Amino acid sequence: MSEDRSALVRHIVVTVAYVVCVAGSLVGVGLFGGTPIAEAAGGVLAADSTHLAPASSAFSVWSVIYGGLGLYTVWQWWDRTDPRRIAWLVVASLVLNAAWILAVQAGQVWLSVVVIVALLGVLALTFQRLLAVPPRSRVEAVVADGTLGLYLGWVSVATCANTAAALLDSGFTGGGAPEWWAVGVLAVVAVVGVALALVGRGRLAPAATIVWGLGWIAVARTSGAPESTTTAVAAVTAAAVVAVVTIVVRLRTGLDTRVGRQETAT
């Protein structure tokens, strides 16, 4: 297959996958006869189902992510070579996203966990490839690095909430100490956020959606059932840790870069 033909196939597949993903998301919000995600699978993914469920307003971040993926889909028609090798990973993420919605609609909560973990793995690999090769323009930095960074951060939080919902669906309620189970999971999310900040040299996009998700978990635990000040404080603390470490690493990376340029100049 010639390079031009290969590029055309890639562009078409990315576009089709995006359309399928958006259609799936519309089903997920209750259009086209679908059941809203919060009501599907017996409501185990609703904002009041577990200590790790974010408030419903948190999911508005999908509008930003889908919008960014739409921009990436349009932009990639001009990216004939895909030197960062991310296009097919984006396709995989879009297909997995749609598959997750179908799994939840079918009431297969544990299957949805398997799907979202696979999605998280795909996005982590995409993030690694984005780090390996710098963006060639500001536009690419926004539509590729920015969008996929937001996607990765949000799915990191959503994976924890999804797993908690699956455990609840299986009858596990925290062994009499659901708050402390939640605190432990939030600590893991904080570790993931710090790791992304260090590996990503302070990239803001993943941290932004991690902080966003953690913040809405805190809101949910202080404004509705199950109420838990302990979980809310843990979520806010985790969000603060991720935000502070990301900013410090970013500032430090910028400082090191400037110092390196000055030393080279002298």
Image: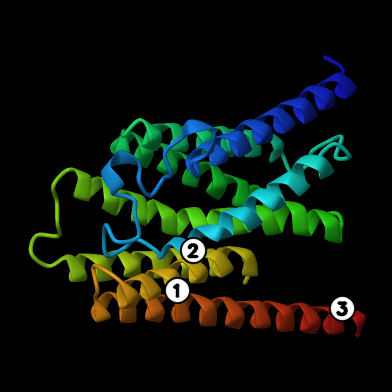
Crowding around mark 2 (Cα neighbors within 10 Å: few <14, some 14 to 19, many 20+) is: many
Q: Quadrant of the N terminus?
A: top right
Which numbered mark, 2 or 1, is in the foreground of this view? Answer: 2
Identify the residue position indicated by label 2 in the image: 58
Identify the residue position indicated by label 1 in the image: 215
Q: Earlier in the sequence, mark 2 or mark 1?
A: 2
Image quarter for residue 160? Answer: bottom left
Crowding around mark 1 (Cα neighbors within 10 Å: few <14, some 14 to 19, many 20+) is: many
x 55%, y 68%: residue: 207
Horizontal relation, residue 224 to residue 144: left or right: left
Residue 219 is situated, as x and y percent measured from the top left of the image, at 39, 75
| Separation of residues labelled 2 and 3 (CA atoms) | 46 Å
Residue 245 is situated, as x and y percent measured from the top left of the image, at 52, 79
Residue 263 is situated, as x and y percent measured from the top left of the image, at 83, 83
Residue type of the residue flagged with mark 1: Gly
* SS class, disc 1: helix
Residue 124 is situated, as x and y percent measured from the top left of the image, at 54, 49
The image's colouring method is rainbow
x 62%, y 54%: residue: 63
Label 1–label 3 contact, CB within 8 A: no
Identify the residue position indicated by label 3 in the image: 264
Residue type of the residue flagged with mark 3: Thr
| Separation of residues labelled 2 and 1 (CA atoms) | 9 Å
x 23%, y 68%: residue: 226
